[in-house]
Image (tube, grey):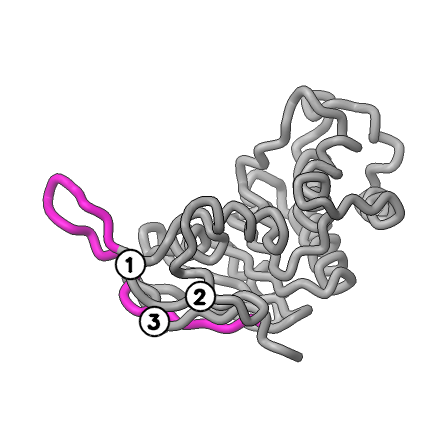
Amino acid sequence: MPRVLIAHDLTKTYPTADGPLEVLRGVSLQVAARESVALTGESGSGKSTLLHLLGCLDAPDSGSITLEGRALQDLDEAGRAAVRRQSIGVVFQQLNLIPSLTVAQNLGFQARLAGREDADWQARIATRLGLDSMLSRYPEQLSGGQQQRVAIGRAIANRPAVVLADEPTGNLDEATADTVLDLMLDLVRDSGAAFLMVTHSPRLADRMDRRLHLKQGRIV
């Protein structure tokens, strides 16, 4: 499989009252199309920072990021925003669903921004996620597991090159978490995306194709 996402020697430091805090210290990784990779590590190891860099939500201090052959590390904010719209799907633990939009509108939101709205693909996603009877509901009318399914569907609706997930099942009970991860893995493979998921759960990490462990800002 072709390597969709390649990061090489990424560093990131933040200023603090006690001086510079070196969060990432030369991180390199690769993820192929249809491959699922778990990113594990203790709190403070740099997992969320790495995900933000890979998701074009922030820029590294040094190092390179390549997505589908395109270098991302030197893009300005407008350039990063364009890449996020077109090529990256993100699922956060907080979900960030838009409360004033229905399930159907939330599902299609990212695809509309990208100019890639596909009614047939969106309908398939809704059916696979068990949401086809809930399309006219609003997020507040859904359970936590149902809201998580909407967030997953939204991230995949524009057929991104890579899907990044930060503890996507952290607020769910074990059985619901397993179901949600099954659906996510199935849909990501069907869409052809590369999939990188931050998780604290060894059990869920074992479900992925492989695992990377981040410790004190480095992959070990």
The residue indicated by pointer 3 is 9
In the displayed structure image, the side of residue 209 where residue 143 appears, left or right = right
Q: Is residue 176 visible?
A: no
Residue 26 falls inside the magenta stretch = yes
The CA span between labels 3 and 1 is 10 Å
Provide the secondary structure element on which disc 2 rests.
Answer: strand
Q: Residue furthest bottom?
A: 1
Above or below residue 48? Residue 63 is below
The residue indicated by pointer 1 is 61
The CA span between labels 2 and 3 is 9 Å
**Disc number at residue 65?**
2
Question: Quick check: marks 3 and 1 in contact, CB under 8 Å?
Answer: no
Q: Is residue 186 visible?
A: yes
Residue 114, horizontal then vertical, whole percent: 67, 45
Provide the secondary structure element on which disc 1 rests.
Answer: loop
Mark 2: amino acid = Ile
Q: For label 3, count other residues whose C-alpha is less than 10 Å away and answer few (under 14), some (14-19) or many (20+).
A: some
